[in-house]
Amino acid sequence: MTSPDADSKGFFGDFGGAYVPELLYANIHELQTRYRSIVEDESFVTEWKSLLRDYVGRPSPLYFSQKISKEIGIKLYLKREDLNHTGSHKINNALGQALLAKRLGKTRIIAETGAGQHGVATATACALVDLPCIVYMGEIDMGRQAPNVKRMKYLGADVVPATSGSKVLKDAANEAIRDWIAHPEDTHYLLGSAVGPHPFPEMVAYFQSIISEEIRLQLKEHEGREYPDTAIACIGGGSNAIGTFYHFLDEENVKLIGVEAAGEGVGTGKTAATIASGTEGILHGSRTLLLQTEDGQVQEAYSLSAGLDYPGVGPQHAHLATTKRALYVSVTDSEALEAAQWLSQKEGIIPALESAHALAYLKKGEFQEGEVVVLCLSGRGDKDMATYLEEVS
Ligand SMILES: *Cc1c(COP(=O)(O)O)cnc(C)c1O
């Protein structure tokens, strides 16, 4: 059995744990000991499920892509997280944690964001539940992702530039952790992916597991069975992927494939493929695989896709890679760009550049004739139009 949960110390095999400064210990301990009973409480479940339905628009459809199925020789189902309110899977987690923060009695939310998608989802959830929201964002990312900065501000959030280090996502996460240390009592840190100290990876996976919970029911309708042959998702920190894998982890017959962003290529030094080229170390509170120099300095990740250029990966994915329960592959910028246009013109669906990495693998991977493949279309591509247009002209 592959349990979706961490062990009692917060580890998935050799990876995970909670490597936090002493000043955060009380916060982390509170979350570790209280979150399960809160999220499994009937009143929480009722509120959470009704918001997922009426506010987020769930269940998200499972769409059979006839044309791509025919082209590749498989049966391809797209899990349409792009149709969620705010345009990606991130709202599932943001909303779950915002409701949790309320029940923990917190009065202030902080978050980190890279591309701004998690920032927008968090600002949205905070508006809904009436909590003030501070989003840390690398100064460079704020320039690159200006429309999302405007969106967050319009939703009522404070966006604070992270000006340290290389001024990107990892630096924003460092700033958020610093803020949390300074405000341990009243603040919840609403982390955006399945990374960070225990219980974040487990908790974020739990909130995103709604993806595979729905896939099972929807596949049953379409195919008469609850399991695909293969499930595919892209990997930044790994939250949409773990949500897609969650209810299939102990079904050994289901092939699980995570697609990392190779950037310009694994081995070029301009990559975000952490599992392909990372080594063990500690990043943002957990032991995992990360891009680092020989003397342990975190290296900058690179991907054209701002949502995937993180130098670490969730500890559960590091574990699934090491035990070979899941297969991790990578796709370059140019392969992802090509796949984005492919889906747009074949199906009339413009995918997020992140999701396009998962799609690109359909052309690279080996599949059995007629196998059932579920692919998580993690978000919509409106935010990437400028990049797409630049690349085709
Ligand atoms: C943030 C984001 C990702 C990457 O994050 P994960 O935690 O790995 O899921 C993927 N797709 C979209 C659309 C995103 O916004």
Image (cartoon, rainbow, N blue to C red):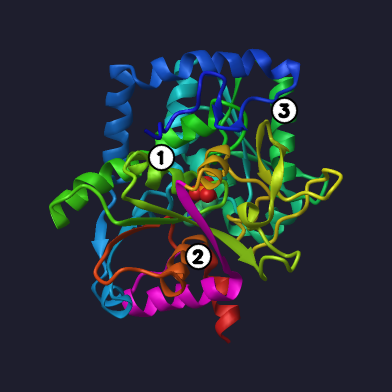
User: Quick check: 171 left or right of 76?
Assistant: right
Quadrant in which the C terminus is drawn: bottom right
Q: Ligand 1 near label 1 (Cβ, under 8 Å)?
A: yes
Does residue 304 show up? no
Q: Amino acid at mark 1?
A: Gln
Going from N to C along the chain, the mark reached first, 1 or 3, is 3
The residues tagged by marks 1 and 3 sit, at their Cα atoms, a distance apart of: 26 Å
On screen, residue 201 above or below 322:
above
Residue named by callout 1:
208
Residue 383 lies, in percent from the top left, at 52, 63
Residue at point 13%, 52% (across, down) = 224
Are there few (<14), some (14-19), or many (20+) residues within 10 Å of tag 2? many
Going from N to C along the chain, the mark reached first, 3 or 2, is 3
User: Quick check: 203 left or right of 303?
Assistant: left
Residue named by callout 2:
357
Residue named by callout 3:
179
Q: Residue furthest right?
A: 295
**Callout 3: helix, strand or loop?**
helix
The residues tagged by marks 3 and 2 sit, at their Cα atoms, a distance apart of: 33 Å
Mark drawn on residue 127:
none
Read off the magenta span.
Answer: 325-353
The one nearer the camera, 347 or 275, is 275
